[in-house]
Image: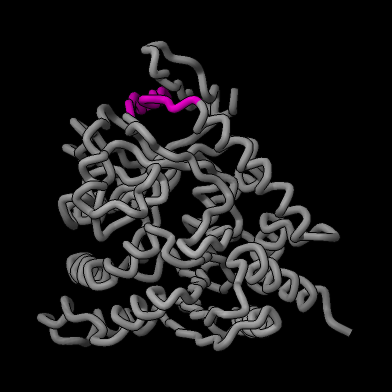
Amino acid sequence: MPTDRERMLRAYADLTIRVGLNLQPTQRLLIIGPIANGGAALEAAPLVREIVASAYRAGARLVETLWGDEALLSARLEHAPRDSFAEVSAWLPDALVQHVSAGHAVLSIYANDPDQLKDAPQDLVGTVQQATARAVRPFRERISRNQTNWAVVAASAPSWARRVFPDANPSEQVDRLWRAIEKLCRLDVPDPIAAWEAHLADLAARTDRLNAKQYSALHYTGPGTKLTIGLPPGHLWVGGRSASSAGIRFAPNLPTEEVFTMPHKDRVDGVVRSTKPLGYGGTLIENFTLRFESGRVVEVKAEKNQSVLQRLVDMDAGAARLGEVALVSERSPVAQTGLLFYNTLFDENAASHIALGAAYKFTLQGGEAMSDEAFERAGGNRSAAHVDFMIGSAELDVDGALPSGTSEPVMRKGEWI
């Protein structure tokens, strides 16, 4: 008889394949990850195997897996030649592009250690991150056009679980994180797929209402935050599901509670304060503020790891501008746990957030068919970066500017009006 964990992992795998990816019989699947340390690969192996089996049951032609290990990067940072950190894989970026261009699906599994690189030389970490981001930019840009169906899920791992549940008995930490993932992915109900269909329908209704409004801007007010984000004509709010260029409907993030769109890259002004730490490249950036003028970050302040945040902003011309604005209710299941996950996949679904870097072309009417230049003229941002950080709280108010010039409340104290 299967154990409760085995039943949960099979349900998680089927949800990932059938709802997250909506994998088609003609497709191959590439699984990337888990990229983590502290036994994550061993811990996630049963989930990966269930996903592979579910993919073949769905008719996948071939499933391949790229396993990662953050400890290998730590070894590189400690021992590799000091002038070698701008070098990247000679084959992986092209392989990713070829896979997506052929219309095959991509799944990433996260189990990252939030503190893996906290003691590493941050200048070298920054060099590796920027070189990698530039190398995989063609792949990311295809993902931004939804050229194929893709998804991101998570697996519990010792180092990550230890960070989320530091006061728990070490023997219970991994299990507690698995139980949190189970609940937030709606795997603890009799029919998870039916529950997800109902949830995705609710998100679609929310995006329909926002798209009907066509706000010209959003105004944010809260402790340390007074920010205006302009929205371009024809922006599209997206929530829950997207569609690939082949018409495959998929839900790229499990869990997901957000609705999001693209800001106008040149129409962001004011100051915004983070409400949760940002885990970036194995480093935590805490209690930070950004000041924008005409769309661009002109001032960065952080109580911890300000230099890391500054290097992110300086990565390229687009990294200092916004590519995403997302609204999330304070009543979201992730927020209600009261947990800080130190993982964007979960924390972004606990609070409204914005993202530095590239915009998704599918968040603009006709954007997927636009050239890069036309997309930029329409207000879309392009960058090798795309990094979400949380700005929502129970003290945040959001107002929408209507095309008529008047404004109306969208959220009060973090809740939808």
Q: Magenta region's main secondary structure? A: strand
- Which contiguous range is marked in magenta? 213-229
Q: Please indicate, yes or no, whether residue 120 appears anywhere in the rendered image.
A: no
Find residue 118 and report its image quarter: bottom left
On-image quarter of the C terminus: top right
Does 211 appear above or below 357?
above
Residue at screen point 80% across, 75% down = 7
Q: Does residue 374 appear left or right of residue 329 in this picture? A: left
Find residue 254 and report its image quarter: bottom right
**Residue positioned most to the right:** 1
Residue at screen point 59% across, 46% down = 257
On whether residue 222 falls in the magenta region, the answer is: yes
Of 158 and 241, which appears nearest the observer? Answer: 241
Of 140 and 256, which appears nearest the observer? Answer: 140
Find residue 27 and report its image quarter: bottom right
Does 296 appear above or below 61?
above
In x, y percent, where is residue 140?
34, 65
Q: Does residue 305 appear left or right of residue 246 in this picture? A: left
In x, y percent, where is residue 263?
34, 38
Residue at screen point 36% across, 12% down = 405
Residue at screen point 52% across, 82% down = 28
Q: Does residue 197 appear left or right of residue 290 in this picture? A: right
Of 328 and 181, which appears nearest the observer? Answer: 328
